[in-house]
Amino acid sequence: MNPYLAVSLVMCGVIVLSLAATAYMAVYFTRRARADLELALTSLAAVIDGKANVEDALVEGRFNRRLAFGRMAHAEGGPVRVFQTELIDAAGGEKWLFVGYPEKGTTEFRPRDSPMFHGLPVLDREDLAAALRVLAEWFQLDYSPDGGYVRLSVPMATRKDIPGDDAFRRQLEILDTLANENRHLQESLNAKGTGAGE
């Protein structure tokens, strides 16, 4: 047999084995990732007495009679993946956004001239990041009258950044308090005629 042909056949065999091993590893790690995600989401679903959807990386249920969601999503305006904890509470009024940077000790609120910032005591807490169990370099709380939700978004580096059930419960408790404060303030501002669009 020609030595060049023999070497070529051996190399083809090595390539076929490498491709088979790579395919096996891809299937193995995909199944493992899916199982890890399912385990994490199932424990969160138990907190809200709901159900987990692994395909959409979503849990949905109820917390204190409000619809509650937890989901992996992409942040608006960037490639960053975030975990969002959300409570539905359509209070109407003005939308707002609060971003905290725990390591820097700074925050920002939009819109800047909004009376909402000083009327939401939850946002004034110095230990807000710790209370929310946020370990990331930033987090975002926002309210959308169009979507009817109060939401916490925290950046994720890996699936392991999905909150545990205790952290998820604590986040929902704080969002519940924030939703009540927001509703009270939105109604108060609308009654005074100083809400958005006035």
Image (tube, grey):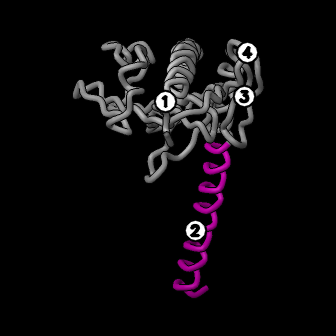
Foreground mark, 3 or 1, reads 3
Residue drawn where x is 48% and y is 46% of the image: 75
Which quadrant of the figure has residue 55? top right
- Report the magenta stretch's main SS: helix
Which type of secondary structure does the marked residue at label 4 adopt?
A: loop
Dot 4 or dot 3: first in sequence order is 3
- Separation of marks 2 and 1 at Cα, in angstroms: 37 Å
- Separation of marks 2 and 3 at Cα, in angstroms: 46 Å
Q: Amino acid at mark 4?
A: Arg
Task: Name the residue that disc number 2 marks.
Answer: 15
Question: 176 and 112: which one is in front?
Answer: 112
Task: Name the residue that disc number 3 marks.
Answer: 60
Question: 77 and 150: which one is in front?
Answer: 150
Residue extent of the magenta highlight: 1-30
Residue drawn where x is 55% and y is 17% of the image: 184
186 with respect to 136 (left or right): right
Which type of secondary structure does the marked residue at label 2 adopt?
A: helix
Foreground mark, 2 or 3, reads 3
Q: Residues within 10 Å of mark 4 (few under 14, many from 20)?
A: few
- Separation of marks 4 and 3 at Cα, in angstroms: 13 Å
- Separation of marks 2 and 4 at Cα, in angstroms: 58 Å
Relative to residue 86, is residue 126 depicted above or below?
above
Question: Of all residues shown, which one is farthest toward the left?
Answer: 104
Task: Name the residue that disc number 4 marks.
Answer: 65
Q: Amino acid at mark 2?
A: Ile
Foreground mark, 4 or 3, reads 4
Foreground mark, 2 or 1, reads 1
